[in-house]
Image (tube, helix red, strand yellow):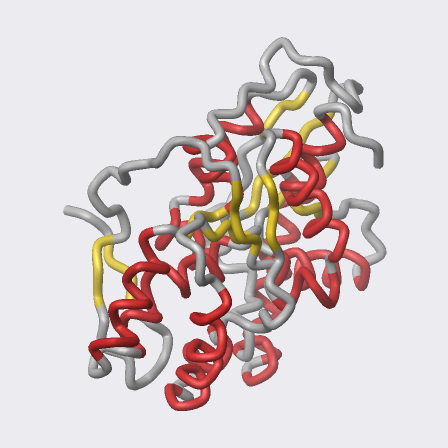
């Protein structure tokens, strides 16, 4: 029996299989759109720049629509459908060319791929736009692996010192985009990188957007469980494709005066494959 995911919004009703039928991937395109996400823009700009560098190294022209903002997920998962729809309505016209939309965040990619269709279910014209966007939306690791078909095996490595890493993927990204599987495959290609398993790997870190603000005590307990498991794994570094989680995990580790820190997968890949820190 397949696992199910459900929308966190109180008035959302969509339920779908966590693992859809195998996706049909296109040939590598000459142009793509990058949806940078608001958290990358505000707190992890280097992750956005490293995403661009990875894509450009594959011979792809990266277009960054300047009008982009939030995907609308915080409002949507808090039950504010009207506000989320207004945000979504502002994003859809930005991607007018029939190019893939690559997102360095599994949860934001999941918003495009799954939940815009729910928001516009009763607006046929907008629903068609949402469906078309969903079909060409890819999380960054997924796009590198299955569309660009990158291979780091045997290539000149950048930072070649052996390192043990723990991979964290947000609970939404795991359910909706299988980001944990894509991240594992990419890390397995890197020389000198050992991915270690850690307890609580599939559990939420406690961020959850507005959840961490509304339920700070519960959120704090969850991130403490997560960071304890990460420290006990023996990892030298945490790698994640979701900046909201990174912000929460790194903040907790810093508060605990721990040296362990997390880095976005894009930056880790860039630095380990010849890019400069």
Q: Where is residue 166 in the image (x, y as percent from the top left)?
A: 61, 38
Vertical comparison of 38 with 97: above or below: below
Can you say which quadrant of the picture contains the C terminus?
A: top right
Estimate the x, y position of residue 273 in percent, counting from the top left.
Answer: 71, 24
Q: Is residue 238 visible?
A: no
- Residue at 20% x, 42% y: name it: 21
> Quick one: 94 or 51, which is closer to the camera?
94
Q: Please tell me how many numbered marks the rendered image carries.
A: 0
The location of residue 155, given as percent across then percent down, is: 66, 13
Q: In this view, does 99 lie to the left or right of 13?
A: right
Q: Which of 174 and 224 is in front in this view?
A: 174
In percent of width and height, residue 140 lies at 53, 44
Which is nearer the eye, 148 or 186? 148
Instruction: Tell me the residue at 26%/72% (across/down).
Output: 127
Q: Is residue 116 left or right of residue 223?
A: left
In the rendered image, the residue lying farthest to the front is 97
Residue drawn at x 63%, y 23% is 194
Q: Is residue 50 visible?
A: yes
Which residue extends farthest top?
154
Q: Quadrant of residue 171?
A: bottom left
Residue at 64% x, 67% y is: 66
| Closer to the camera in the image, 136 or 61 | 61
């Amino acid at each position: 029996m397949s696992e199910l995911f459900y929308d966190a919004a109180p008035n959302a009703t969509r339920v779908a299989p966590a693992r859809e039928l195998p996706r049909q991937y296109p040939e590598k395109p000459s142009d793509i759109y990058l949806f940078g996400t608001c958290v990358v823009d505000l707190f992890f700009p280097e992750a956005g720049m490293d995403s661009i560098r990875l894509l450009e190294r594959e011979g792809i022209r990266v277009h960054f629509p300047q009008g982009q903002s939030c995907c609308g997920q915080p409002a949507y998962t808090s039950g504010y459908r009207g506000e989320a729809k207004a945000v979504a309505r502002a994003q859809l016209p930005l991607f007018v060319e029939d190019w893939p939309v690559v997102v360095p965040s599994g949860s934001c990619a999941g918003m495009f791929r799954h939940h815009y269709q729910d928001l516009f279910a009763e607006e046929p014209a907008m629903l068609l736009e949402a469906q078309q966007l969903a079909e060409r939306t890819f999380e960054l690791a997924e796009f590198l692996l299955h569309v660009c078909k990158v291979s780091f095996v045997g290539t000149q490595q950048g930072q070649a010192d052996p390192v043990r890493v723990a991979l964290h993927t947000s609970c939404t990204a795991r359910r909706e985009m299988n980001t944990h599987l894509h991240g594992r495959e990419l890390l397995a290609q890197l020389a000198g990188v050992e991915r270690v398993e850690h307890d609580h790997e599939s559990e939420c870190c406690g961020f959850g957007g507005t959840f961490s603000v509304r339920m700070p005590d519960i959120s704090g307990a969850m991130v403490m469980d997560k960071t304890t498991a990460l420290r006990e794994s023996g990892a030298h570094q945490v790698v994640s494709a979701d900046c909201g989680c990174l912000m929460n995990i790194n903040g907790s580790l810093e508060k605990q005066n721990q040296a362990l820190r997390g880095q976005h997968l894009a930056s880790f890949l860039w630095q380990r494959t010849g890019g400069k820190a």
